[in-house]
Image: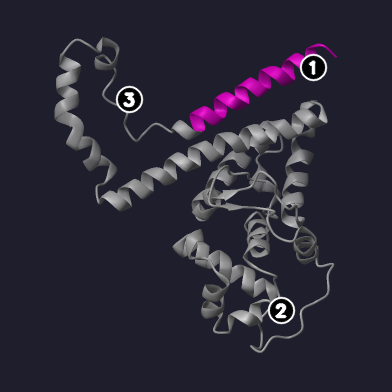
Amino acid sequence: MSSGTGGTETSGSGDIARTLDLLWDTGPRASRGPKPGLTLDRVVETAVEVADRDGLGALSMRRIATELGTGAMSLYRYVPGKAELLDLMLDRVQRPSRNPADLGDGGWRGALEALGHATLALYRRHPWLMEVNQSRPVLGPSALDGMEKVLSRIKPMGLSDPELVSVIILIDGYVVGAARTQLYQEHAERSSGLTDAQFWEAQRPALEKAMKSGRYPVLAALSEDTFGPGFDHFDFGLQRILDGLEVLVAGRRSTE
């Protein structure tokens, strides 16, 4: 259900009909490859592992074949190419949890709150998702299972069907922005060799001088913990979105 924007790869850029056959297991089955035990599932799982570990740029049919200890040509018995493989990977990582409790306490607000945190965790487990433009996803069973699960929980909001879908898009868009910020911060720390604390400490003398100048009275009056790590900016923003939806739902019910 996640739909990152921008990126180096685009979902749905391969043979859509063949991808759908593979996602829904409706096409001809691959003949047994030269390596015993090689399956489409293993190919996709290995591709996800490579992308998780080394990024999407490291993903290639040759690299996956090397990881599996087989020849690159043998992989084409299972998947036409990298574009179709990417769509299979996207569907694989979006498999929804089978535990009903993972979507909150039963109410629509709890479900959306859980969805927000689960989606953030998804991007943290698979940072390469940020490198994929998913504006035109090829919908497989995992994506539809997830959508079905969420819609069934938020249907009681009483909104129109397009509005319910828009609610999911709203949550996803917020999470994508937050996840991108977190991942960029981690990348900056790795590439610079400076921790976040070290980075800001290096600026402290200049900032203290600026605060004493009288030019920034509002900033200078902020409490010492304003920019501390103890405040959960992600959850604060998510809760305000849910507050706004509460107002919308209550307004609709008052007019019934």
Q: Is residue 174 above or below residue 224?
A: below
Q: Amino acid at mark 1?
A: Arg
- Residue occupying the point 63% across, 60% down: 86
Q: CA distance from mark 3 to mark 1?
A: 38 Å
Residue 124, how many percent across, how many down? 49, 50
Q: Which residue is mark 2?
A: 77
Q: Nearer the viewer, residue 237 or 46?
A: 46
Q: Split into 4 quadrants, where in the image is the C terminus?
A: top right
Q: Nearer the viewer, residue 104 or 33?
A: 33
- Residue occupying the point 66% across, 89% down: 34
Q: CA distance from mark 3 to mark 2?
A: 57 Å
Q: Is residue 113 above or below residue 46?
A: above
Q: Amino acid at mark 2?
A: Arg
- Tell me: 109 left or right of 238: right
Residue 215, how many percent across, how many down? 22, 11
Badge 2 marks a residue whose secondary structure is loop
Q: Amino acid at mark 3?
A: Thr
Q: Which residue is mark 1?
A: 253
Residue 89, how many percent across, how many down? 63, 61
Task: Give yes or no for residue 251 being in the magenta stretch.
Answer: yes
Which residues, given as a range, are shown in magenta? 235-256
Q: Which residue is mark 3?
A: 226
Pick whichever of labels 3 and 1 is earlier in the sequence: 3
- Residue occupying the point 59% across, 35% down: 173
- Residue occupying the point 67% across, 35% down: 169
Pick whichever of labels 3 and 2 is earlier in the sequence: 2
**Taken as a whole, is the magenta stretch helix, strand or loop?**
helix
